[in-house]
Image: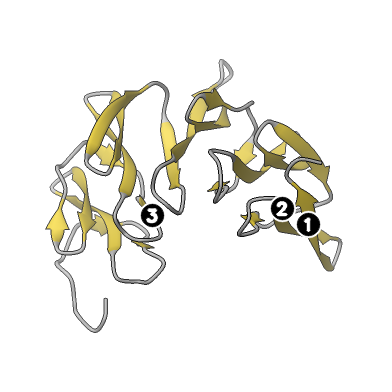
Amino acid sequence: MNDREGPEYDAVGHPALSADGAVAAYRAERNDTWFIRIGDREEPAYDFVTDPAISADGATVAYAASQDGRWFLIAGGVKRPLAGHPVMVFISPDGRQVGWVDRDPLPDGGSKMRVAVPGNIGEPFGLVGRPVFSPTEPLAAYGAEDGGRIFVVIGSRKIETPDRVSDPVFSPDGRRVGYGARVGRELWWKVLEVYP
């Protein structure tokens, strides 16, 4: 990064960058253990870690980690236990809210995905895109698919939409959510009011 070669690892994940690009974090594997590297510093090692999420100012890095079959959410150096099996974490721009996508195993061997934010675990879907937090409240928006149906989810509100959707984005005031929807060969940009 920035014309500097980093250390060699057995494997690395996708990097996360602060909005100004000053802070980078990524997961790395060495000798069958995983850890998060933030800048030039390595966090403690675990059996597995998810790719990290980073606040806009780079002050808070969040990720999920597994040790001896137990999962934890680590955000800003604070570690707390999690139930379930997180596959992804996401963070609000100011770093105060951290959410995660959890995978629920099904009896037939498949799984469903749920988005969890502080105080709320969403309904299950077959697939979930990358959630984003509102800039003004602990409310998440994301694209989801279940049984061939495509949705944009804003909090607990579910809006069916044609074909595929891009990851949604909030307006700076948090009052609208925009996303791209593919209808056949056309791409439509759609904007929804958060509270209609």
Q: Nearer the viewer, mark 1 or mark 2?
A: 2
Name the residue carrying label 3: 55
Task: Name, please, the residue furthest toward the bottom.
Answer: 3
Residue at 76% across / 40% down in the picture?
Answer: 195
- Distance between the Cα atoms at labels 2 and 3? 21 Å
Mark 1 element type: strand
* Cβ atoms at labels 1 and 2 below 8 Å apart: yes
Q: Tell me which amino acid carries mark 1.
A: Val
Instruction: Report which residue position mark 2 lands on.
Output: 176
Q: Is residue 173 visible?
A: yes
Q: Quadrant of residue 2?
A: bottom left
Q: Residue at x 69, y 40 (%)?
A: 153
Please tell me which residue is depicted at 45% across the width and 46% down the height of the picture.
90
CA separation, marks 1 and 3? 25 Å
Q: Which residue position is annotated with label 1?
A: 191
Lower position in the chain sequence, tag 2 or tag 3:
3
Q: Residues within 10 Å of mark 1 (few under 14, many from 20)?
A: some
